[in-house]
Amino acid sequence: MHERMCAKSRPKNPWEFAHELRATAPQRLRLGTSEPELAALAKCDFVLTELKRQMGRWMLRYLATLEDEVYGAAAELRIYVGQLARGTPSKRALSNLR
């Protein structure tokens, strides 16, 4: 009985969770902005390219390319979900746009 209760409280297999997260996360994102310097990015679609497990958190990486740009990505959006700092019990979400 005790083993069953421990098994229920145990987190899922990381690969199962990664599969579920990839299936439920948006595959494409579009930014809405009123900032003039970011107006070009509002026309881009950010496509999910990577889902990576890190210590205590997950990172989703989205890349965007402009229609007239042939080489490389126009922008990168990283979304972190989970522990943002080591040793903190709280879990949050954070995003970085480059």
Image (tube, helix red, strand yellow):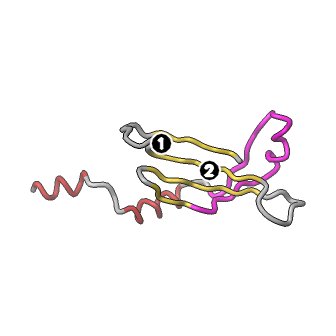
For image coordinates 62% across by 50% down, the residue present is 78
Is residue 64 toward the left or the right of residue 14 in the image? right
Residue 78 disc label: 2
The residue most toward the top is 34
Residue 40 disc label: none
x and y, in percent, of residue 59 in the image: 54, 53
Q: What are the residue bounds of the magenta stretch?
A: 27-50
Amino acid bearing label 2: Arg
Q: Quadrant of residue 25?
A: bottom right
Q: Is residue 32 magenta?
A: yes
Is residue 68 toward the left or the right of residue 88 in the image? right
Crowding at label 2, few (<14), some or many (≥20) Cα neighbours within 10 Å?
some
x and y, in percent, of residue 72 in the image: 78, 63
Task: Give the total number of marks visible in the rendering.
Answer: 2
What quarter of the picture does the N terminus occupy? bottom left
Q: Is residue 57 above or below residue 32?
A: below
Identify the mark nearer the N-term, 2 or 1: 2
For image coordinates 54% across by 60% down, the residue present is 51
For image coordinates 45% across by 45% down, the residue present is 82
x and y, in percent, of residue 58 in the image: 49, 53
For image coordinates 58% across by 48% down, the residue present is 79
Tag 2–tag 1 contact (CB < 8 Å) = no
List the residue tagged with mark 1. Answer: 84
The residue most toward the front is 86
Amino acid bearing label 1: Leu
SS for tag 1? loop
Separation of disc 2 and disc 1 at Cα?
A: 13 Å
x and y, in percent, of residue 49 in the image: 63, 62
Q: Is residue 57 magenta?
A: no
SS for tag 2? strand
Q: Is residue 87 above or below residue 61?
A: above
